[in-house]
Amino acid sequence: MRPALFDLVGRLTDDDLPAYVYDLPALREHVHAIRAALPDRVELLYAAKANSEPRILRTLAGHVDGFEVASGGELSHVRGLALDAPLAFGGPGKTPPELARALDAEVERLHIESEHELLLLTSLLGDRTVNVLLRVNLPVDLGQVALAMGGHPSPFGMDPAQLDHCLDLIAANARIRLRGLHLHLASGLTAPAQLALIEEVLTWAEDWAYHRGINLPEVNVGGGMGVDYTHPHKMFDWAAFGAGLRPLLARHPHLTLRIEPGRSITAYCGWYITQVLDIKVSRGQAFAVLRGGTHHLRTPAAKQHDQPFEVIPDDNWPWPWDRPEARDEPVTLVGQLCTPKDVLARRVMVKRLRVGDRVAFAMAGAYAWNISHHAFLMHPHPTFHHVDDAEVSVTGDACAYQLS
Ligand SMILES: *Cc1c(COP(=O)(O)O)cnc(C)c1O
């Protein structure tokens, strides 16, 4: 944990817990490094669904080429922040009002999921124009990946054979401009696996366009850059990814490549800070019951992993009896919910964990609070805080932060 973050966590009172803390300077540094690793002809969008917290989006705004939104709600939210960044609107099941709102908002790109959606668009267009990408589900062999959105029967995008009907519709309507194709096939890929997939996709896409005599200025290959919760320090190798893209792009000299990662951008900047309420032993196994749980941080339940954590000892013990503790043994960290699924980490070795100690769960910046079932059991919501270097440029103090 960085010192500025550790300081902020130390300032939180027990009443503030559980708390989400977002490390905005760390996020800024991370996205800056990602952008710097990518060739110029790659446009970087952030998939807002990973975490659309306003200050996170504001932090990213100067470093990405735009935001990908996947609902009318996200569209209104991001537009409402007045970030002045281009928006791409994607995702399945867009309703007619959502499509109309996207047209009113003059989104930079609309990612079309089906022929029906394209027909809806033509009926709503009026005298407006729109730039579209057709989302395609290519028959590629993805092997073992965390989440497969394509390469097999799926509700996302169209089969290649269905694209031709869409081309006919677009050819008949000058107000719909085809900019290219969109593919978001899998999540959880390493840099070499992403590069291999992108190479296959680009070869197919250029061949597809060539045989139809159409111009293909752009391919969006989606997100899915891997995040390894078991090895937090093994990050997606953006430098190798950028280096690998250069020769690939050289073979497609007229193409702009777009990527729209979510998880790999914001996962690392978020922390869920809580506290041990009870420690008990059940049939020989230690359990630590924490304030909060998977109704605040559903990520480990959704992905079936152990959320990585750090123990922050708290020596304050106000009670006259012995402090319950686990020592040099595997402990299962659970929340306050009355369900056996409320597990944050299972049988993880700890040196020492006592009632009252704080536990800081790392990698809680993406698909964490915003995918959790907050209302279940009616516990209080966490409080939210940011490490912020807004003052740094003023004071020159590298450790400056503010609680907010
Ligand atoms: C979810 C999603 C993304 C982002 O995926 P990550 O795994 O968070 O990088 C990008 N594009 C589309 C179309 C998505 O549905």
Image (cartoon, helix red, strand yellow):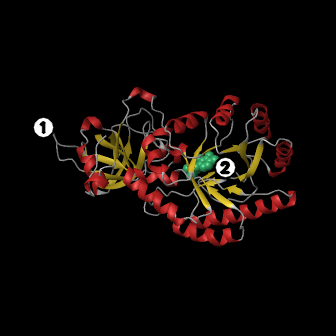
Is there a contact, CB below 8 Å, between mark 1 and mark 2? no
Within 10 Å of the Cα at label 1, are there few (<14), some (14-19), or many (20+) other Cα atoms?
Answer: few
Going from N to C along the chain, the mark reached first, 1 or 2, is: 2
Q: Amino acid at mark 1?
A: Pro
In the rendered image, residue 309, in percent from the top left (x then y), is placed at 36, 52
Residue 2 location, x and y as percent? 31, 57
Identify whether 232 is placed above or below 278: below
> Residue 330: which numbered mark, if any?
none
Q: Is residue 59 above or below residue 243?
A: above
Give the x, y percent position of residue 186. 64, 54
Real-space Cα separation, disc 1 to disc 2, in angstroms: 55 Å
Left or right, 4 with respect to 31, comes to: left
Question: Is 9 left, or right, of 154 in this rendering?
Answer: left
The mark found on residue 320 in the picture is 1
Label 2 secondary element: loop
Amino acid type assigned to the residue bearing label 2 in the image: Met
- Residue 136 seen by the camera: no
Does the image show residue 86? yes
Q: Residue furthest left?
A: 320
Q: Nearer the viewer, residue 314 or 331?
A: 314
Q: Which mark is residue 149?
A: 2
